[in-house]
Image (cartoon, helix red, strand yellow):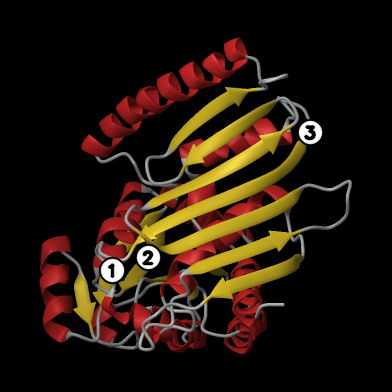
Amino acid sequence: MIRIVAVGCGWVSLHRHIPAIRADPAYRLVGVVDRDAEKARRSAQELHVAHATTLDDPALGGFEAVSIGTAPTSHHGLVMAGLSLGKHVIVEKPFAMSVAEADEMVARAKERGLVLAVVHNFQFARSVAAARQAATEEKYGPLRGVVGLQLSNDRRRLPEWYRTLPGGLFYDEGPHLLYLARAFIGDTPIVSAHTLAGPDPDDRTPRLVDVHFAAGPDRPFGALHMNFAAALSEWQLLVLCDRATLVCDIFRDILITLPDDGKHHPDQILRSSVAATLGHWAGVVTSGLRYATGRLDYGNAEVFRRFARATGDGVAPSGISGEDGRAVVAALHRTLAGD
């Protein structure tokens, strides 16, 4: 059993990391850490564990791993602290604030022989996992490409710290579509990237972001289109197979399979409409039931399963390794730099 300490007593730790940890018999949560001593005390009392304001506090007792769910600007310092203490570390995305920080984190983990992982969870959500399996098995023919679509409403609940990030909200939310694209097309290079600045000089979030990936005419491509000035919040991933289009509704964890519409005749258009409508509402029911019963975890359980397995066998966890985190950070900065 892996004794683990959760760092950060904010929303992501309390509602994503800790539930995944406590649902997995490979772990035992033994403590929480937060720079706010009172917040740490309250969380520890509710969770019946020890608490501290720093990782090296003896009050935490013995432990082997650290889960970090703090603001992104603190990730590098906390990861380095955990690794320096000889602990395996898993950290929320975005992995780091720069490629240089990411490189230092990865190098320290290798130097100490420790596992370093990042929470790239949506690639393991039920909808995306099913689409990946269909694409891998070529159930609907070869994969042609993936298209990520994001609309973000700036009036929804947002973390207070997002304005401090390079690229603002894009730097916090962009990793999701970037690692989802990588999950299907691998480490395909970015061939073009464009951003359109927003109107607020105090907010570095672009209004629009477009990213294109390609590795040759015979290889699957990728395209991401993100809008941060919408009156709607939606994240969709379209998986374009030869004989079908798989639509992953990320927020609702729904997979809709739309058949090849051939010559686009009225009957074929109707078939697509029926498939989309029935697939959506069937997904709303099944995901709604999982949400109501606390089982809609958006892939976090699989992330922590892979981390636990990696700490045992020493093999970098596929899809969530430090190298994967570093690749996404590099893609974020490549995008912000543009062509």
- Residue 282: which disc? none
Q: Nearer the viewer, residue 232 or 253?
A: 232
- Residue 3: which disc? 2
Disc 3 is placed on an element classified as loop
Q: Nearer the viewer, residue 203 or 77?
A: 203
Amino acid at dot 3: Pro
Q: In this orientation, does residue 118 appear?
A: no
Q: Nearer the viewer, residue 116 or 184?
A: 184
Above or below residue 244? Residue 193 is below
Q: Nearer the viewer, mark 2 or mark 3?
A: 3
Left or right of residue 244, residue 291 in this image: left
Q: Alpha-carbon neighbours of circle 1 within 10 Å: few (<14), some, or many (≥20)?
A: few
Q: Position of residue 219 (x, y in %)?
A: 84, 48
- Residue 158: which disc? 1
Cα distance, mark 1 to mark 2? 32 Å
Left or right of residue 130, residue 216 in this image: right
Q: Which residue lies at the image location 56% right of the left edge and 57% below the top edge? A: 225
Q: Alpha-carbon neighbours of circle 3 within 10 Å: few (<14), some, or many (≥20)?
A: some
Q: Alpha-carbon neighbours of circle 2 within 10 Å: few (<14), some, or many (≥20)?
A: some
Point out the residue furthest to the front here.
266
Amino acid at dot 2: Arg
Q: Which residue lies at the image location 53% right of the left edge and 65% below the top edge? A: 175
